[in-house]
């Protein structure tokens, strides 16, 4: 691929590389693929929390985010209080009968 490249120098220092346009396009495609591969590798190396497909599916389908996360975290209160909050506060939010801003 590099056999058709012409190097243009200024004061003895390479400044430009001229190549056929098809080869330039091929280099751009390869660069984009490398960017995608690096992004994939970084995402796979991240040891952060993963979310099960079922949770994502329910959120995408419009289920109440509060309800989905409470069920996923197994916080669907068997007691009156949930981490210091009264269960009756969360129930209307889970049913989307009450709005809550964060």
Image: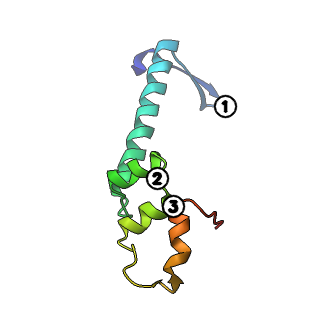
Q: Earlier in the sequence, mark 1 or mark 3?
A: 1
Q: Earlier in the sequence, mark 2 or mark 1?
A: 1
**Residue 42 seen by the camera:** no
Where disc 1 sits, the SS reads loop
Q: Which residue is mark 2?
A: 63
Callout in the foreground (3, 2)? 3
Q: Nearer the viewer, residue 28 or 82?
A: 82
Is 11 displayed left or right of 17 in the figure? right
33 vs 40: above or below: above
Q: Earlier in the sequence, mark 3 or mark 2?
A: 2
Q: Which residue is mark 3?
A: 95
Quadrant containing the C terminus in the rendered view = bottom right
Indicate the position of residue 79 as horizontal and vertical percent values.
Answer: 40, 84
Callout in the foreground (2, 1)? 2
**Mark 2 neighbour density, 10 Å: few (under 14) some (14–19) many (20 or more):** some
Q: Quadrant of residue 14?
A: top right
Q: CA distance from mark 1 to mark 3?
A: 73 Å
Indicate the position of residue 16 as horizontal and vertical percent values.
Answer: 60, 26
35 vs 21: above or below: below
Looking at the image, do the residues carrying marks 2 and 1 touch, with CB atoms under 8 Å apart?
no
Residue at 49%, 78% in the rendered image = 87
Indicate the position of residue 73 as horizontal and vertical percent values.
Answer: 37, 70
Where disc 3 sits, the SS reads loop
Q: Which residue is mark 1?
A: 11
Q: CA distance from mark 2 to mark 1?
A: 66 Å
Looking at the image, do the residues carrying marks 1 and 3 touch, with CB atoms under 8 Å apart?
no
């Amino acid at each position: 691929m590099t056999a058709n490249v012409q190097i243009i120098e200024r004061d003895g220092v390479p400044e430009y590389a001229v190549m056929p346009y098809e080869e330039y396009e091929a280099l751009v495609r390869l660069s984009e693929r490398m960017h995608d591969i690096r992004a994939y590798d970084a995402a796979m190396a991240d040891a952060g929390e993963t979310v099960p497909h079922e949770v994502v599916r329910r959120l995408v389908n419009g289920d109440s985010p509060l309800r989905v996360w409470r069920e996923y975290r197994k916080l669907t209160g068997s007691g009156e209080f949930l981490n210091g909050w009264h269960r009756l506060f969360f129930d209307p939010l889970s049913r989307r009968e009450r709005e809550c801003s964060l």
